[in-house]
Amino acid sequence: MKPSPHDEASWTVATAKARLSEVIERAQSAPQTITRHGRPSVVVVSAEEWQRKSARKGTLAEFLLESPLRGIELDVGRQRDEPRDLPL
């Protein structure tokens, strides 16, 4: 049974193309999935939602400084094996 158009959050490519304005309007309140060959292909979200999800949350330096591994001594020694013979 197909959901009513008001509950629909999944669209085929053909339907999404034909009803793009509606897809965009609905994406303002909930993500809209577009399927290709019966499988989810892309998700359309509002620009506000995209900004919220993709906003940078600090710098790499801050991330490293807040790491729970900060200050742990790691043994990063290198093996001193002889080189391999490779046929060239």
Image (cartoon, helix red, strand yellow):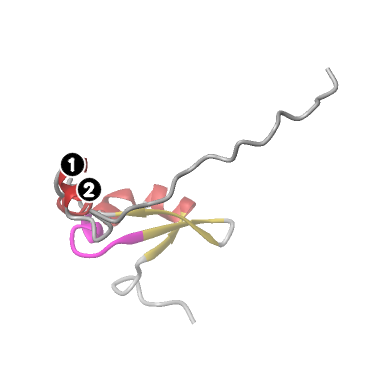
Kindly state the secondary structure of the residue where label 2 is placed. Answer: helix
Magenta stretch: give its range.
25-32
User: In this orientation, does residue 51 appear?
Assistant: no
1 w.r.t. 53: above or below: below
Say which residue label 2 marks: 64
Of residues 81 and 50, the one drawn nearer to the viewer in this rendering: 81
Residue located farthest toward the right when viewing the structure as drawn: 87
Membership of 65 in magenta stretch: no
Q: Give the residue type at disc 2.
A: Leu
Marker disc for residue 61: 1
Of residues 5 and 52, the one drawn nearer to the viewer in this rendering: 52
- Which residue shows up at 61% across the image and 36% down it? 80
Q: Quadrant of the C terminus?
A: top right
- Which residue shows up at 17% across the image and 55% down it? 66
Where in the figure is residue 65, as x and y percent of width and height?
A: 17, 49
- Which residue shows up at 28% across the image and 58% down it? 69
Where in the figure is residue 52, as x and y percent of width and height?
A: 16, 53
Q: Give the residue type at disc 1.
A: Ala
Residues at badges 2 and 1 in contact (C-beta under 8 Å)?
yes
Q: Quadrant of residue 81?
A: top right
Residue located farthest toward the bottom when viewing the structure as drawn: 1
Q: In screen coordinates, is 32 left or right of 66?
A: right
Where in the figure is residue 42, as x and y percent of width and height?
A: 42, 52
Structural distance between the alpha carbons of marks 2 and 1:
5 Å
Where in the figure is residue 59, as x and y percent of width and height?
A: 16, 42
Q: How many marks?
A: 2
Q: In screen coordinates, is 41 left or right of 4?
A: right
Of residues 51 and 57, the one drawn nearer to the viewer in this rendering: 57
